[in-house]
Amino acid sequence: MDMLNERLKNPIVSLALGAVAGLILGLLFGYVFAPVQWTDAAPSHLRADLQADYLRTAIDSFSRTGNIGEAQRRWLELGEAGDSALAAVENEPQHLTPTELEAFKIAVSATGPAAGGGTGQPAADEGGFPFIVWVGCIVTLIIGMLIVFTFLFRRGPVSDGDTAAMQAAEVTRQAEQTDYESMGEMPPLAQFMTTFMLGDDLFDDSFSIDSPAGEFLGECGVGIAETSGPGEPKRVNAFEVWLFDKNDIQTVTKVLMSDYAFHDVETHDRLSAKGDPVLAQPNSKVVLETAKLRLVAKVVDLFYGDDPTTASNSHFERLTLELAVWPI
């Protein structure tokens, strides 16, 4: 569901969904709820059996009135269907006599396909809807569905940052929190999990610390302290772990560093200005204290990136931290 929500935020996905929904609703409205009603269609657009009936009526009228002009007008309204309609009438004349048929043929000079056509309202064919339009609607629907499927359910990333953030959220959900109470310790006031994945260039997680009664006590969090190397994604070699206490005037910060960053003198000294440097190791703990709060940041798991362009163990591929806070 989270992945679906992330995909739906993409404007291209929203546009594709809107197009497909609009097409489906349009077809339903036009052919189910309020279908098109064809009126005043020209004789040339009628079914073959109705064209034959129309021609029988025209012949019968001519035999009674002798109006050549009216007979020719009605014949011309059949257009190219005139000859086939006349053949159908000759095969099944019903009440018409051979003399009436011959007189009508002479009057309209029916020696070949009739010319012209009627001027009725929309030219509907027997199917009531042009075949090419049906083909266009079906093709559009298929393309729209493919676009939606591609963006909603493909495994490939929409962008590296989004994919890394979603993967990190999944790792965080599966991580087990430390049961301090079973270890004989006081349960923490607040306990949080957070995960960084390579590619989440905007990683910056923060959490509110509240008392059991809902009173705001402070905040804690983790953010990127420094990156190294050119290009994207950013290669993170250090994180800032921080604790804010509303009863303290200063935010306490410690810098959790990769093995290379911690042992590289220049990097170590540069990052020391941001907070006390600490080497990140699996199951290691970083303790931060303020006037009223104590935070323990535990490294739940840690993986370094494998990149031939960077030094060994220089940047994090993945890092999961548990932040537990106790009152002092």
Image (cartoon, rainbow, N blue to C red):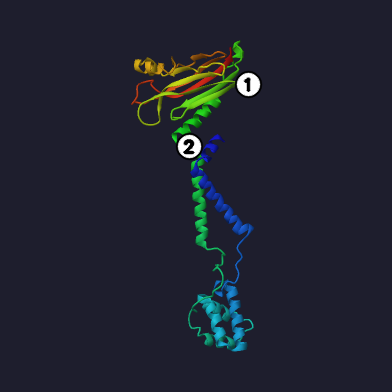
Residue extending furthest toward the top? 184
Residue extending furthest toward the right? 213
Compared to residue 143, the image places residue 274 above or below, namely: above
Q: Which mark is residue 155?
A: 2
Residue extending furthest toward the left? 309
Q: Which of the 4 image quarters holds residue 51? A: bottom right
Do we see residue 175 in this rendering?
A: no
Taking 174 as reference, is 225 left or right? left
Closer to us: 103 or 204: 204
Please give the name of the residue rendered at 48% of the width and 34% of the height, measured from the top-left corner: 162
Q: Which of the 4 image quarters holds residue 52? A: bottom right
Residue 106 spot, x, y in % from top left: 52, 87
Label 2, label 1: how far apart the Cα atoms are: 42 Å
Do we see residue 215 in this rendering?
A: yes
Specify the quadrant that holds the N terminus. Answer: top right
Closer to us: 159 or 93: 159
Closer to us: 252 or 75: 252
Residue 110 spot, x, y in % from top left: 51, 83
Please give the name of the residue rendered at 47% of the width and 31% of the height, measured from the top-left corner: 164
Q: Which mark is first along the chain, 1 or 2?
A: 2
Please give the name of the residue rendered at 35% of the width and 24% of the height, measured from the top-left corner: 310
**Residue occupied by mark 1:** 215
Mark 1: which secondary structure? loop
Q: Which of the 4 image quarters holds residue 248? A: top right
Q: Amino acid at mark 1?
A: Glu
Closer to us: 246 or 280: 246
Compared to residue 46, the image places residue 322 above or below, namely: above
